[in-house]
């Protein structure tokens, strides 16, 4: 008899349509949407019922045209359920794929509850969208209709101490971003598991484990995924209003820079081509799960057919997936181009980098020049490696 893994969880997915009944199957940190028949069979397997008993219950509940036998149920299990990894002997936690690597937990679920419970009421749908609209307008007013404070801010005057103040504040705002996701999740009665630190490709990031939200309706998931940006906009609004009452130009300009830096982070989070907030929002609104992998698969198959001079049938493919794939490809072509261009430029000026290292000092300009060069070298080699790997995989079938 098949024994269902203890890592398996099943929940009904919220839907505005009574005819659109789906269930969320969670296996470890992987999620699958399944129909009522698969859901029913897994529930029966969890109860350790025999295949014959399951077939009788299925026939009574679903009334199929041809009565199912225990052997038919075993075929459904082998073909439709076993590949999802729901059985003890088929579940391997070490093979779980995740975008964030080298994870370290910073806040446990218990700590998150204590911090976020008082603010979860900010995420009631009506107040959330109303306040968000106001905060967006306030931030846009600051960035585009006030005098640009970056012109007035003297980066070299504060030295390294200035930057040692700026980056901890931005890290705190980023943590507030993650707490926003957690608070919104609590609002809709789903328990966030943790907030942690890790690496998304080469970039250090904070993350929130809110995998339980898959069973919620689209609107609730959109609010949860926007909640981090909402908290950043709120932080910006409070800082900007505070500067209106300050008379110290140095502090005012410093806080203006924090607002603009935070606004830049918000813009990055609104790019749907990497797995930041806008990616999950687009995935929810379009109804496309595993959006990134499906986009990559679509592009690979499309280019493969073009090379083989075969017809491309796009009628069965969602328009939202086609549009996303085209824009994502364009985005990365542009990003790769500018990284390689800057990388080649730095290679040509490598002697300048060596001279700066030779006469190293702790001024902010020197330190951030070195960081920028190291960043470009790292990403330049990473881009070259990925391009070589892609070409070899295509032409040598590696």
Image: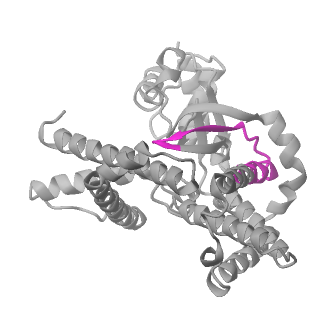
Task: Look at 31% across and 44% down and name the residue there.
Answer: 381
Q: Is residue 57 above or below residue 313?
A: above
Q: Position of residue 44 (x, y in %)?
A: 62, 25
Near-viewer residue (358 or 347): 358
Task: Look at 78% across and 73% down and name the residue there.
Answer: 131
Q: Is residue 284 above or below residue 93?
A: below
Task: Look at 34% across and 51% down and name the residue there.
Answer: 296
From this viewpoint, is residue 317 visible?
Answer: no
Q: Which residue is at the far front? A: 359
Q: Position of residue 165 (x, y in %)?
A: 72, 53
Left-right relation of 129 to 151:
right
Near-viewer residue (234 or 257): 257
Near-viewer residue (219 or 209): 209
Residue 191 colored in magenta in the image? yes
Left-right relation of 74 to 40:
left
Count the marks: how many? 0
Residue 146 colored in magenta in the image? no
* The C terminus, quarter of image: top left
**Span shown in magenta:** 177-203
Task: Look at 68% across and 50% down and name the residue there.
Answer: 164
Figure quadrant of residue 41: top right
Q: Is residue 208 above or below residue 17?
A: above
Q: Which residue is at the far right? A: 118
Q: Position of residue 76 (x, y in %)?
A: 44, 29
Q: Which residue is at the far bottom? A: 145
From this viewpoint, is residue 29 visible?
Answer: yes
Q: Position of residue 233 (x, y in %)?
A: 72, 67
Scheme of image coloration: one colour
């Amino acid at each position: 008899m098949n024994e269902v893994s203890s890592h398996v969880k099943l929940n009904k997915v919220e839907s505005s349509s009574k005819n659109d009944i789906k269930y969320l199957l969670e296996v470890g940190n992987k999620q699958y949407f399944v129909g009522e028949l698969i859901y029913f069979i897994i529930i029966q397997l969890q109860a350790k019922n025999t295949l014959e008993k399951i077939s009788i219950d299925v026939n009574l509940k679903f009334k199929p045209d041809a009565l199912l036998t225990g052997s038919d149920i075993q075929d459904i299990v082998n073909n439709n359920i076993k590949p999802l990894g729901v059985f003890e002997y088929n579940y391997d936690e070490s093979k779980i794929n995740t975008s964030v690597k080298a994870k370290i937990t910073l806040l446990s679920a218990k700590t998150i509850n204590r911090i976020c419970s008082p603010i979860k009421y900010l995420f009631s749908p009506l107040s959330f969208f109303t306040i968000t609209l106001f905060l967006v307008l306030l931030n846009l007013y600051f960035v585009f209709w006030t005098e640009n404070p970056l012109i007035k801010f003297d980066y070299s005057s504060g030295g390294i101490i200035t930057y040692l103040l700026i980056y901890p504040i931005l890290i705190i705002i980023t943590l507030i971003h993650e707490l926003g996701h957690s608070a919104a999740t609590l609002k809709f009665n789903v328990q966030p598991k943790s907030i942690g630190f890790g690496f998304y490709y080469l970039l250090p990031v904070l993350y929130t484990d809110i995998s339980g939200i898959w069973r919620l309706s689209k609107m609730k998931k959109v609010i949860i995924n926007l909640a981090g940006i909402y908290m950043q906009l709120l932080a910006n609004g409070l800082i900007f209003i505070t500067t209106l009452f300050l008379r110290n130009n140095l502090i005012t300009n410093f806080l203006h820079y924090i607002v603009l830096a935070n606004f830049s982070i918000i813009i990055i989070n609104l790019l749907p081509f990497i797995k930041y907030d806008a990616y999950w929002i687009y995935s929810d609104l379009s109804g496309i799960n595993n959006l990134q992998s499906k986009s990559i698969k679509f592009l690979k198959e499309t280019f493969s057919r073009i090379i083989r001079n075969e017809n491309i049938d796009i009628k069965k493919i969602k328009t939202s997936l086609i549009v996303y794939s085209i824009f994502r490809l364009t985005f990365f072509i542009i990003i790769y181009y500018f990284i390689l261009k800057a990388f080649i430029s730095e290679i040509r000026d490598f002697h300048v980098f060596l001279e700066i290292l030779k006469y190293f000092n702790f001024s902010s300009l020197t330190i951030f020049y070195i960081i920028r060069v190291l960043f470009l070298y790292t990403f330049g080699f990473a881009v070259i490696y990925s391009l070589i790997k892609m070409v070899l995989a295509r032409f040598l079938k590696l």
